[in-house]
Image: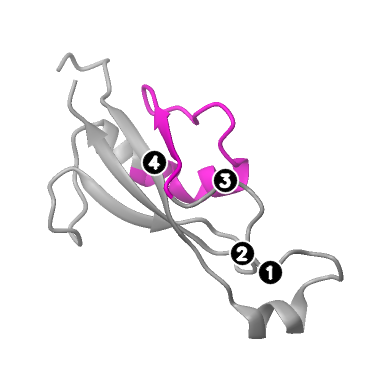
């Protein structure tokens, strides 16, 4: 792969979690318990390390460094599969877990 070209990275919503005890203690009224953006199983593609269109900006801030690592050919030291990482958004009231996969191209 040329030095200036980065691999695409697929970002898939694995799990939208509930932290009801934290949510009930800290969230404002009428704030949903589960993230309202996207559904489990939905995927987005990051091209050249950029945020995919329609992807949550808050989640992107939590994932961008790992997407960049995978796009540049790196790998997570924690996952079994080369070119794959598991990460989450940084919203403590609506945690969402993502699977990030370098796409062979």
- The stretch of residues the image draws in magenta is 41-66
* Pointers 1 and 2 in contact (C-beta within 8 Å): yes
Q: Earlier in the sequence, mark 2 or mark 4?
A: 4
* Pointers 3 and 2 in contact (C-beta within 8 Å): no
What is the spatial separation of the Cα atoms under label 3 and label 1, in whole angstroms?
14 Å
The structure residue drawn at horizontal position 36% and vertical position 22%, both measured from the top left corner, is 48
Q: Residues within 10 Å of mark 1 (few under 14, many from 20)?
A: some
The structure residue drawn at horizontal position 79% and vertical position 64%, both measured from the top left corner, is 31
Q: From the viewer's perspective, is the residue at label 3 or at label 4 nearer?
A: 3
The structure residue drawn at horizontal position 60% and vertical position 68%, both measured from the top left corner, is 92
Query: Which mark is drawn over residue 94?
Result: 2
Q: Is residue 97 above or below residue 68?
A: below
Image coordinates for residue 57, horizontal then vertical, percent: 61, 41
Q: Is residue 89 magenta?
A: no
Pick whichever, 1 or 14, lies toward us: 14
What is the spatial separation of the Cα atoms under label 4 and label 1, in whole angstroms?
22 Å
Q: From the viewer's perspective, is the residue at label 3 or at label 2 nearer?
A: 3
The structure residue drawn at horizontal position 61% and vertical position 47%, both measured from the top left corner, is 58
Image coordinates for residue 32, horizontal then vertical, percent: 73, 64
Image coordinates for residue 65, horizontal then vertical, percent: 39, 44
What is the spatial separation of the Cα atoms under label 1 and label 2, in whole angstroms?
7 Å
- For the C terminus, the quadrant is top left
Residue that sits furthest to the right in the current view = 29
Q: Residues within 10 Å of mark 3 (few under 14, many from 20)?
A: some
Image coordinates for residue 39, horizontal then vertical, percent: 53, 49
Query: Which mark is drawn over residue 33?
Result: 1
Q: Earlier in the sequence, mark 3 or mark 1?
A: 1
* Pointers 3 and 1 in contact (C-beta within 8 Å): no
Q: Is residue 6 above or below residue 76?
A: above
């Amino acid at each position: 792969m040329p030095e200036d070209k980065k691999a695409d990275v697929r970002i898939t919503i694995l799990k939208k979690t509930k932290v009801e005890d934290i949510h009930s203690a800290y969230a404002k009224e009428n704030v949903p318990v589960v993230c309202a953006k996207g559904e489990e199983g939905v995927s987005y593609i990051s091209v050249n390390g950029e945020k995919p269109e329609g992807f949550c900006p808050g989640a992107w801030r939590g994932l961008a460094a790992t997407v960049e690592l995978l796009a540049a050919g790196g790998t997570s030291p924690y996952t079994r599969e080369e070119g794959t990482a598991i990460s989450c958004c940084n919203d403590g009231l609506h945690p969402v877990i993502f699977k990030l996969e370098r796409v062979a191209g």
